[in-house]
Image: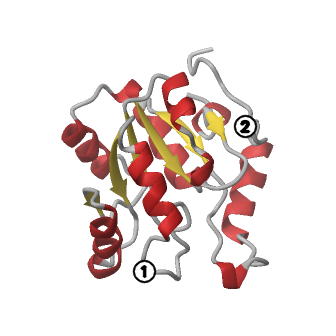
Amino acid sequence: MTWNNILQPDLILEGSVLNLTPDSIQQYGLKGLVLDVDDTLVPITVSAASPEMKQWVEEIRTYAVLCLVSNNLSESRIGSIARSLNLPYYLGAAKPSRRKIRAALEQMNLPVHQVGMVGDRLFTDVLAGNRLGMFTILVEPIVHADAVLRSHPIRNFEVWVSEILGASIAPKQTKINKDL
């Protein structure tokens, strides 16, 4: 697998995970979603899911099995967020390692090609999902209201490097077949 393939998301959403709709999930034949936590579901400085995020999870769970997989090591923070959303979770995932994502897939009891990996980072979330053959979805980092102008230097660097390596990181682009 070449760098441009391994870093290329299957779906790139303009905006946050809240823009991932039931229609999109059904369109791509997804039955489950593995969700990153920090900056995907909640800003990294926040310890609770917003009312909008709780509502989104409730809507999406009627279409897909959900599980959180985070690189964060804080049981108190990630556990609290997961419990508030009533979702199973794995922390300390060390993505792009696949170990904890595989555990989530086993728990979901779904074929890997029917599960989407959703996250805001190319070199962790997208890379890990692509290495497993998952449908990968890149979202923009969720921004805390007090940090609207906050930049994301690591993510910006990842996008820059990915584009140099041949990945196309433009919103609303899809890649239909990973093997082409």
Toward the viewer: 140 or 73? 140
Toward the viewer: 35 or 152? 35
Q: Earlier in the sequence, mark 2 or mark 1?
A: 1
Query: Where residue 23 sits in the image (x, y, percent)?
Result: 55, 30
Query: Where residue 16 sits in the image (x, y, percent)?
Result: 63, 56
Query: Where residue 131 sits in the image (x, y, percent)?
Result: 45, 36
Hey, what amino acid is under mark 1?
Answer: Ser
Say which element carries label 1: loop
**CA separation in Å, label 2 and label 1:** 33 Å
Residue that label 1 marks = 47
Q: Does residue 115 lie above or below 52 as drawn?
A: above
Hey, what amino acid is under mark 2?
Answer: Ala
Query: Where residue 79 sits in the image (x, y, percent)?
Result: 28, 72
Residue 72 in view here: yes
Relative placement, left or right, of 166 versus 47 is right
Tag in front: 2 or 1: 1
Neighbour class for label 1 at 10 Å: few (<14), some, many (≥20)? some
Image quarter hosting the C terminus: top right
Say which element carries label 2: loop
Q: How is the image coloured?
A: secondary structure
**Residue at x 58% of width, y 53% of height:** 18
**Residue at x 74% of width, y 36% of height:** 172
Residue that label 2 marks = 167
Relative placement, left or right, of 109 versus 65 is left
Image quarter hosting the N terminus: top right
Relative placement, left or right, of 148 versus 23 is right
Toward the viewer: 108 or 55? 55
Neighbour class for label 2 at 10 Å: few (<14), some, many (≥20)? some
Q: Does residue 154 lie above or below 46 as drawn?
A: above
